[in-house]
Amino acid sequence: MQSLWLAVAALLGHWRRHPMQLVGMVAGVWLATALWTGVEALNAQARADYARASAVLEAPVRSRLVPADGRAFDHETFLQLRRKGWRVAPVLEGRLRVGETTDMAVRLVGIEPISLPAGARVAGQRLEDIDLAAFTGQPGQAWVAPDTLRRLGAQPGERPQTTDGHRLPPLMVQESLAPGIVVVDIGHAQTLLDQPGQISYFLLDTDHPTALPAELTETMRLESEEEGELQRLTDSFHLNLTALGMLAFIVGLFIVHASSGLAFEQRRGTLRIVRACGVSLRALMGALALELGILAVAGGLLGVMTGYVVAAALLPDVAASLRNLYGAEVAGHLTLSPWWWGAGMGMSLLGVLLAGLSTLMQVRGLSILALGQTHAWWSRFSVLLRHQVAAGALLVVLALMAWRVGQGLLSAFVMVAATLLAAALFLPALLNGLLAMVGRWVRRPLVQWFIADSRQQLPALSLALMALLLALSASVGVGSMTAGFERTFIQWLDQRLAADLYVTPRDTGHGLAIAAWLQAQSSPAVDAIEEQWRAETRIGANRVLMQGVGPDSRLPRSWPLLEALPDAWALLTNTSAVMLSEQLARRLQVRPGDPLDLPVAAPGRSLRVVAVYADYGNPTGHMLVPLSWLRRHFPGARLAGLAVHLRGAGTPVLAQRLQEAFALDSSGVVEQSVIRQWSIDIFDRTFAATRAMNVLTLGVAGMALLISLLALAGRRLSQLAPLWALGVRRRQMAWLSLAQTLMLASLTTMLAMPLGILLAWCLVDVVNVHAFGWRLPLYVFPGQLLMLGCMGIGVSLLAALAPAGRLWSVSPAQLLREFSRDA
Amino acid sequence: MLTVHEVHKSYRTAQGSLPVLRGVSLRLGSGESLALMGESGSGKSTLLHLVAGLERPDAGSIQASGRQLEKLDEAGLARWRREGVGLVFQQYNLITSLDVGSNLAFQARLAGRYDPQWLERLTVRLGLSGLLRRYPEQLSGGQQQRVAIGRALAARPPLVLADEPTGSLDEATAEEVLGLLLELVEETRCALLMVTHSRRLAGRLGRCLQLRAGRLEEVEG
């Protein structure tokens, strides 16, 4: 045991003499752990909230009964079902805008606790623990999560007002309720939603048969209980975040690996002496492992704390992304379990162990005498390069297999990860090959040395350069994808938002009255009103919003189609045809020309798909159907919106008059330019977290390069001293060193560009299709590439400045020490 | 060729100033060879470094090939090292990133005195013809020192400075390497100043001086 502590003491002395290496090691663990735990904190928070959202009603429920025509059930249906012996529990759900100062949309869930099956739980509360009189009576109770209460700016017991002028029952906090949900008694819900006697669906307990009796199939249908739909929908988003977090983690570990490798090289002598003095190999390995453990705990603690700060900073943007992309509500603050803290420390330890494993193996594999031998850089590096190229080739095969054979999001990510890692493994061999090729052409001695010495730096710098390659190509790939998406999205938005004014009426009657009023206006005169009749249905497991298109619709002028049969619009309005959003078409695996059966009574059940259109950012399936068909099969279809085309200017004036005439709030009448800006803002926010992760990863790569260069600077003196002795000035050496780093970084940056574009292609053509259901065109933005290239070189320049500065000011005495100890 | 006159050099240490050279003077003509002996710490290498332009004297003058070294700026000293001297170190100090061929030609090219025919002759004389594509780490100590000698002589400098060039070699190899060095020095008619601990090796050079307490003494026989 004593030999272990003596060995630890001898090893730790190294860090006193090389504090920058220590900083490098700890910073590597710190950054790697911080970014990974930060991302995992976001994922953990979101998943916990989804779990709470799906657990609003926990009951032994097999399925639910939903109206076949998309309308709501009435109270009479409930009584009929009960009389038939069906133990059903009614639920009314709807969206509600609440708040006088903060306008917040919430999901209102109205339940009848008495009819819920025995053993059910509501927001984590057992039925027998609920004060039924207080919950169902007057004024009742409105259960909210702490986060919802905070966002409403209210206190428990308060009764916030809805935008329709109703007051919620007194707020009561339920810790286990998901954010963005308000649970009330169904009677209160019917009042708040202006749907007296209406029921969205019935919950059926497990005793009921799986099939619906024939007399009920006309009016209702059975649906399986959705198991974790939000988790399924948002999996791609979280996998995306996890991938970015893992990338940053790996880049951070590169720093640890580089630092620990260098420390090993510099401590060969110490290791030899320690072994020669009688410390066993086991004790020495134990000491090194203990040292790594201490560093992992120190870096890990810092990392987990920083990860919390990173997650807290990114959470609002991530929550906004989830809300905009999937309609998923995530709390605006972090509540993390002890498991998360433990996992962060565990990852830190595991990461350091992985990064330091090669050092431990080197110590294990070398004899006492070999420990002291001069490092034969070239022969070792040649072997390493061969191994790296072989591993890279295997990864390329894996990527190709994942692309051609694999299906689903996971295989898409395997393809991306394998491609990136293969490129990183090829990088040192590529750089070495390039430099060797150039080296054959040059004759001037300093240039020859410059190239040859750059090759010699590769073993020490290759990991940092790999990190730079990964970070830059990720930035190029994700940057191209988001910029391409933005361009496509804005073009699509400009085409889709063809009307001047968009009106959202309260109900169909309200909408028809507004339409009539608008037709009567003369200044500005209304050119056309596009009535948006909508109904909701389900096709298989997919929730679908249908929109009717009439023969005089203006949609054909403004609705871009991705893929269509000839005269698709004429086919849609004149025959039994349907157009689908891209993501819905992919989920249903149909293309133009294919038949599609819808859950309605025959005839008219089977429609022909005539076109597919883009519908970016919509988690719900969308479908255009003939208006006459919609009204026939879905009598409950409602007039959900009016798109108003005006003749001439005066949109704000008309919007103002409309608001006054029909008591509409600002969200009920929106000008086209406002919706456009609002959509673009949402878009920007959606990718804010991704952009932030990219910048952080690039920063970590810069740090990797800086630490590698600083650590290398000490060893560089012995390589540069002979050059100085042969007549090269110190400042010249500093410039040459700076130029070497910039050359290697520039070559890496140049290689990162095509790799980034390949990554962008993977994202838009493979990952996006699996993750969101849409394929985007691949755009390359030369300006963006140039900017990212400059950033990469700029980061490298910053990293190279300090080591070059040290060379600039190195004294002759320091250089002399490298080859003379005899004064 | 080389005149060192009343050169003083001391180092600052934690205990104060440590004088190493206290008024050293010597002369060395073209084609002459001089061995410099002395105990460890006597200042042999310091004197060699001063003549090489790697360090500056505190006082005194060093005139070599028409240059006053103490008056040269850093660029001038670098030029002197490039063109005026060939350096051979005990630890060889080859450029590990370059192969043998490039190491041999390096200083000659740097000085603008690259002569492929001379280099080829030198390579043959040094027995390095079959090793040109190898890297320093792939050579034995004796081979590395032969490369270092070749590098030092490739530019045909007027002065060769050797700091214990055989100090890391076994006796037989040391004899062989020194023999080669002396033959080539004689062939190129340059001056040789060599630091050594070995009286036997010193005896093979034209003259021998001993550094003792910072001053030079002639060694007889």
Image (cartoon, helix red, strand yellow):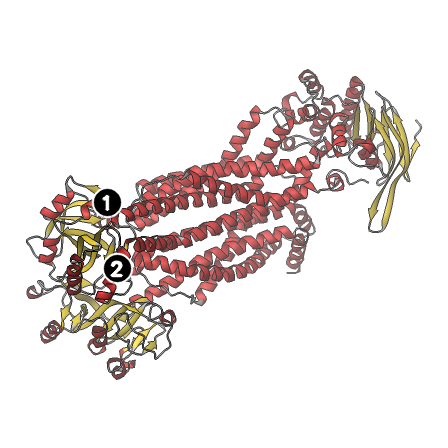
- Where residue B146 appears, as percent x and y from the top left, is 72, 26
- The quarter of the image holding the C terminus of chain A is top right
Q: Nearer the viewer, mark 2 or mark 1?
A: 2
- Where residue B8 appears, as percent x and y from the top left, is 88, 38
- Where residue A650 appears, as percent x and y from the top left, is 26, 54
Please indicate whether residue A714 sits to the left or right of residue A567 in the image: right
The mark found on residue A560 in the picture is: 1
What's the chain of the residue with tag 2? A
Q: Amino acid at mark 2?
A: Ala
Q: Secondary structure at mark 1?
A: loop
**In this figure, which residue is indicated by the disc labeled 2?**
A655
Q: CA distance from mark 2 to mark 1?
A: 27 Å
Q: Quadrant of residue A204?
A: bottom left
Please indicate whether residue A681 sits to the left or right of residue A298 in the image: left
Q: Secondary structure at mark 2?
A: helix
Mark with earlier residue (2, 1): 1
* Residue B37 at least partly seen: yes
